[in-house]
């Protein structure tokens, strides 16, 4: 099984960015931990981060035929991006949305996700664990459907 982990804007700053909300681990720390879990599940994962909406859309489009599933933290694009939502719907690759913080417990504008309705489901609020939970969710889903 091959899973693409997509990370949106400002997630490259994890570790120093608002640690009270997002924790002290860097994206590279989270990637290493998630890879350890993926090996246990016999799954290959690739991490990608971009601050640019169109690059995330390109990655989703290029996933067709190359990845079995996607786990995405669209970051701020969660709340604004019709383009990322449409890309997920277009490729028809099972996708799980994840967030470090609980977006439903924060400002009003964060409570709405434009991307979640294009996904199987959403995992939000478990810090770095959300990545591991996202991996478990997508692999379980794919095992039961492939
Ligand atoms: C986030 C939540 C978003 O609202 C925010 O814009 C982020 C990170 C999270 O993982 O908690 O950049 O996606």
Image (tube, rainbow, N blue to C red):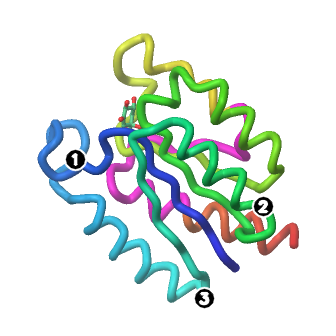
Q: Spatial distance from mark 3 to mark 1, Cα to Cα?
A: 29 Å
Residue assigned mark 3 = 42
| Label 1 beta carbon within 8 A of ligand 1 | no
Name above or below for residue 58 compared with residue 53: below
Disc with the residue nearer the chain's start (2 vs 3)? 3
Residue displayed at 49% across by 30% down:
77
* Residue extent of the magenta highlight: 117-134
Disc with the residue nearer the chain's start (1 vs 2)? 1
- Quadrant of the image occupied by residue 115: top right
The mark tally for this picture is: 3
Circle 1 — which element?
helix
Q: Position of residue 88 (x, y in %)?
A: 72, 43
Q: Spatial distance from mark 2 to mark 3, Cα to Cα?
A: 21 Å
Disc with the residue nearer the chain's start (3 vs 1)? 1
Residue assigned mark 1 = 13
Badge number at residue 41: none
Badge number at residue 64: 2
Q: Position of residue 124 (x, y in %)?
A: 46, 41
Residue displayed at 51% across by 22% down:
79
Q: Going by the image, does 144 lie left or right of 106?
A: right
Residue neighbourhood size for the residue with mark 1, other residues' Cα within 10 Å, grouped as few (<14), some (14–19), many (≥20): few
Name above or below for residue 50 compared with residue 53: below
Nearest to viewer (mark 2 / mark 3) = 2
Question: What is the quadrant of the N terminus in the image?
Answer: bottom right
């Amino acid at each position: 099984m091959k899973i693409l982990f997509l990370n949106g804007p400002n997630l490259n700053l994890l570790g120093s960015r608002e640690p009270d909300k997002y924790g002290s681990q860097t994206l590279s720390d989270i990637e290493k931990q998630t890879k350890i879990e993926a090996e246990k599940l016999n799954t290959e994962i690739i991490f990608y981060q971009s601050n640019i909406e169109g690059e995330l859309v390109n990655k989703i489009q290029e996933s067709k035929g190359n990845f079995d599933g996607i786990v995405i933290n669209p970051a701020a694009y969660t709340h604004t991006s019709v383009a990322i939502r449409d890309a997920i719907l277009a490729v028809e690759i099972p996708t799980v949305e994840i967030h470090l913080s609980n977006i439903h417990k924060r400002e009003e504008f964060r409570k709405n996700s434009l991307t979640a309705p294009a996904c199987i489901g959403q995992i939000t609020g478990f810090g770095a664990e959300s990545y591991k939970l996202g991996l478990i969710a997508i692999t379980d889903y794919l095992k039961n459907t492939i």
